[in-house]
């Protein structure tokens, strides 16, 4: 456990973000490795895997339900110096994760086929996405225990072990991808099925390594089989915090799916180009996302310790770091879009769509960084409904005009890209208003304690 209630706020954020960024980088690498080999199969395969990969957003939404609730409750317990509570929350989160694993397997079995029939721009794309998801389904289901264990680490202020495990999973995937996808050494390429299988095997290795860490090395929170049995007194606050955060990611899944649906009439090249652009953008976002994952842990411990000044400072430092990083990424994506998508798009038409997408949407990166920082504070204070409301505002302001535009003569891809930029800017305004309101609401009592001398001054 690391105490984040003393010392430099910026230092704590950066210290936590560094291993998180490395872990997320290597995690994204195996998506890019898959994409590289799949791109050699053809545009239909790229579009199918990209559209199928969007379904991963559903799993991310559900794992966020676990992750955000776990980080918030454990960080509050650590800040309050309540180790038994932290340990109970961890085991309850893991028990909920196992239940979600079974749910994800069942949902995938009944939902994969209709999902791909809806989004795929043609039978070849639908079949590619369906094959990929069926083989990736076990790996997706295992993301839940991975999320529970990784979030427990972040809540206690530790991020390095999670990074080591993620590096190991990526190495496994990098080794398996060319063997299973392209048939290197075997002469039996599995194509998109191999991409899904390689990812599933890599995640399974990661789960085993995480379990080994908690059994042999972790001391502040520990696996306790008896404590896995559901306790509503713990599940209720965990879900109250986590469900809106999961809903926020689910709305992003709806948003991305809507774009796939809106541009399906432009053919597989458009869907493939958008898919590659999204993957490249997500990879570029890794440093900013690492800050976004560090902020809730730092602010959460200080919230648990009733340190209102340090919670506010965490928001300020988070905004500065996020916006600085996103500004640099925006310049990079605006100046070098062709080079960034070129490695994953052998078809010039696909590359052109991906490059245009990056060029336009890079103008909203700074606003997105601001939204990330605000969301981290919502999570830290244990009220994620404002974050969901912010994302919902973006969804409404995008989908309604986008559907109208798609029915007009001369509808083009750039209409979708520029509309997306406008809605992110509006979302940033909404997030700013909501975070200001939440800080006033939740920190007023802490300020009273500080004025009475009950809470020690910031260290």
Image (cartoon, helix red, strand yellow):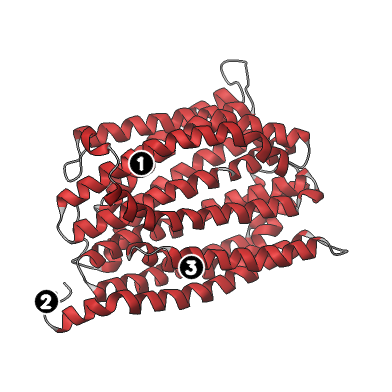
Of circles 1 and 2, which is in front?
Answer: 1
Please state, as top left, top right, bottom left or bottom right, where the C terminus lies in the image.
bottom left
Q: Residue at x 45, y 42 (%)?
A: 27
Name the residue rendered at 58%, 29% in the picture: 134
Number of marks drawn: 3
The crowd level at tag 3 (other Cα within 10 Å; few <14, some 14-19, many 20+) is: many
Point out which mark residue 454 bears.
2
Residue 149 makes an appearance in the image: no
| Label 3 to label 2: alpha-carbon separation | 33 Å
The quarter of the displayed image where residue 214 is located: top left
SS for dot 3? helix
Q: Where residue 371 is drawn, which disc sits there? A: 3
- List the residue tagged with mark 1: 96
Relative side of 225 to 13, left or right: left
Q: Quadrant of residue 291?
A: bottom left
Element type at mark 2: loop
Which badge, 1 or 2, is on the more N-terminal residue? 1
Using a 10 Å C-alpha cutoff, classify the residue at mark 1 as few (fewer than 14 neighbours), some (14 to 19) or many (20 or more).
many
* Separation of residues labelled 1 and 2 (CA atoms): 37 Å
Q: Nearer the viewer, residue 155 or 161?
A: 155
The part of the image, by quadrant, that contains residue 314 is: bottom left
- Callout 1: SS: helix
C-alpha gap between disc 3 and disc 1:
28 Å
- In the visual, does 2 lie left or right of 432? left
Q: Earlier in the sequence, mark 3 or mark 2?
A: 3
Q: Nearer the viewer, residue 309 or 145?
A: 145
């Amino acid at each position: 456990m690391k105490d984040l209630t003393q010392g430099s706020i910026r230092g704590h954020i950066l210290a936590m973000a560094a291993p998180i960024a490395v872990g997320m980088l290597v995690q994204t690498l195996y998506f890019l490795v898959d994409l590289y080999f799949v791109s050699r199969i053809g545009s239909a395969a790229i579009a199918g895997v990209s559209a199928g990969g969007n379904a991963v957003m559903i799993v991310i939404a559900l794992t966020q339900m676990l992750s955000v609730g776990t980080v918030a409750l454990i960080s509050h317990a650590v800040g309050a110096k309540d180790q038994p509570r932290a340990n109970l929350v961890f085991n309850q989160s893991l028990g909920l994760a196992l239940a979600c694993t079974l749910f994800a397997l069942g949902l995938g079995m009944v939902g994969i086929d209709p999902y791909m029939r809806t989004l795929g721009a043609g039978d070849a794309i639908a079949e590619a996405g369906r094959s990929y998801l069926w083989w990736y389904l076990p790996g997706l289901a295992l993301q839940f225990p991975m999320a529970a264990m990784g979030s427990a680490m972040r809540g206690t202020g530790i991020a390095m072990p999670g990074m080591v495990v993620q590096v190991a999973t990526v190495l496994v995937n990098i080794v398996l991808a060319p063997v299973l996808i392209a048939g290197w050494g075997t002469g039996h390429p599995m194509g998109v099925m191999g991409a899904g299988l390689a990812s599933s095997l890599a995640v399974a290795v990661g789960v085993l390594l995480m379990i080994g860490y908690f059994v042999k090395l972790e001391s502040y929170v520990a696996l306790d089989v008896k404590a896995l049995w559901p306790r509503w007194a713990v599940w209720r606050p965990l879900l109250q915090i986590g469900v809106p955060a999961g809903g926020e990611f689910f709305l992003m899944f709806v948003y991305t799916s809507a774009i796939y649906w809106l541009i399906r009439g432009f053919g597989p090249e458009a869907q493939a180009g958008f898919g590659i652009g999204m993957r490249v953008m997500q990879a570029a976002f890794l440093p900013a996302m690492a800050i976004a994952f560090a902020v809730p842990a730092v602010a959460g411990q200080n919230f648990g310790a009733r340190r209102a000044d340090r919670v506010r400072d965490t928001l300020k430092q988070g905004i500065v770091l996020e916006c600085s990083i996103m500004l640099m990424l925006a310049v990079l994506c605006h100046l070098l879009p062709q080079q960034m998508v070129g490695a994953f798009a052998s078809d010039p038409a696909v590359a052109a769509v991906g490059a245009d997408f990056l060029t336009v949407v890079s103008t909203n990166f700074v606003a997105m960084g601001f939204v990330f920082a605000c969301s981290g504070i919502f999570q830290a204070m244990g009220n994620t409904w404002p974050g969901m409301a912010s994302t919902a505002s973006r969804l409404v302001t995008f989908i309604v005009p986008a559907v109208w535009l798609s029915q007009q003569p001369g509808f083009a891809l750039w209409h979708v890209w520029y509309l997306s930029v406008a809605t992110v800017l509006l979302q940033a305004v909404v997030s700013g208003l909501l975070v200001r309101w939440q800080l006033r609401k939740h920190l007023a009592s802490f300020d009273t304690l500080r004025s009475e001398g009950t809470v020690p001054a910031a260290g």
